[in-house]
Amino acid sequence: CFCLKDVRVSVPAAILREGTATLFCHFDLEGDSLYSVKWYKGRREFYRFTPKEDPAMKIFPIFGLDVDQGKSNATQLTLRHVQLSVSGRYSCEVSADAPSFHTALVSGDLDVVETPRGRPVISGIRHRYRTEETLGGNCSSTWSKPAAKLTWFINGNPVENLVLYPVIKETDGERETSYLGLKMVIKPHHFPHGRLKIRCSASIHDIYYQSTEKSVEEERPRGLLHGTGAGIHYVHTP
């Protein structure tokens, strides 16, 4: 029999705001005829391609969705000037024509990204520390959607001594700010050459990555010369 099979979608996981997103709906009719292809955002249909009708393409407007009709057809859907509201689940429904009328529905998720306004910011960390002191600081990445994932590194190695904070919603109700704290006791091995390097990175999917680095010097006790009748010796003072 002629059977609809191998229906699958290819939806970009993330796209920059104001960019163009191309979604694909792949299927094998095995000799059957195509009746229609429908696209949904959530549960709302916004695009239909029915090859035997005139016009074959129909658009059902949804706020924020701008379909590029010149670059859309039975297997491809192109959205242009995408906004944050376009994020969500997209489903493609393929229906074969008579006599089978077989139908299959497959879905994929799209995330529209607004990148942060600048590099991550490191705060609260001094320029000098002694061994056995507690080093504490914060890293923040502001005004993005979704919130950036933050990671601390000490001398190039990921850090596990973290202080977690909730994501902050900005005043516009859409953008978000992320914070991640660091708190650790400094050991001698953290100063391999008298200097410790701290880095905080911010990432969103695979389309945004920025980092900020700060150097911390080892503060060593100062030696003072004291004279005595027996000679000279050093006294270490804080």
Image (spheres, rainbow, N blue to C red):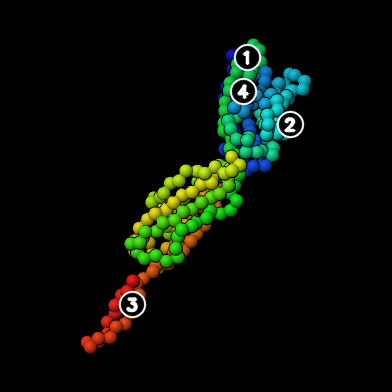
Disc 1 to disc 3, C-alpha distance = 89 Å
CA separation in Å, label 1 and label 2 = 26 Å
Whichever of labels 4 and 2 marks the residue nearer the N terminus, that label is 2
- Residue at image position (39%, 59%) is 135
Whole-angstrom CA distance, mark 4 to mark 2, is 18 Å
For label 1, the crowd category at 10 Å Cα-Cα, with few meaning under 14, some 14 to 19 and many 20 or more, is some
Q: Which of disc 2 and disc 1 is earlier in sequence?
A: 2
Query: Which residue, given by chain and number where applicable, does mark 1 sit on?
Result: 101
Residue found at the very far left of the displayed protein: 230
Instruction: Name the quadrant of the N terminus.
Output: top right
Residue 30 visible in the displayed image: no
Left or right: 209 in relation to 36: left
Image: 3 above or below 205: above
Badge 3 crowding class, 10 Å Cα cut-off, few under 14, some 14 to 19, many 20 or more, is few
**Dot 3: element:** strand
Query: Mark 3 or mark 2: which comes first in sequence?
Result: 2
| x 33%, y 62%: residue | 132
Kindly identify the amino acid type of the residue bearing the numbered disc 3: Gly
In primary-sequence order, the first of circles 4 and 1 is 4
User: Relative to 177, is 223 above or below?
Assistant: below
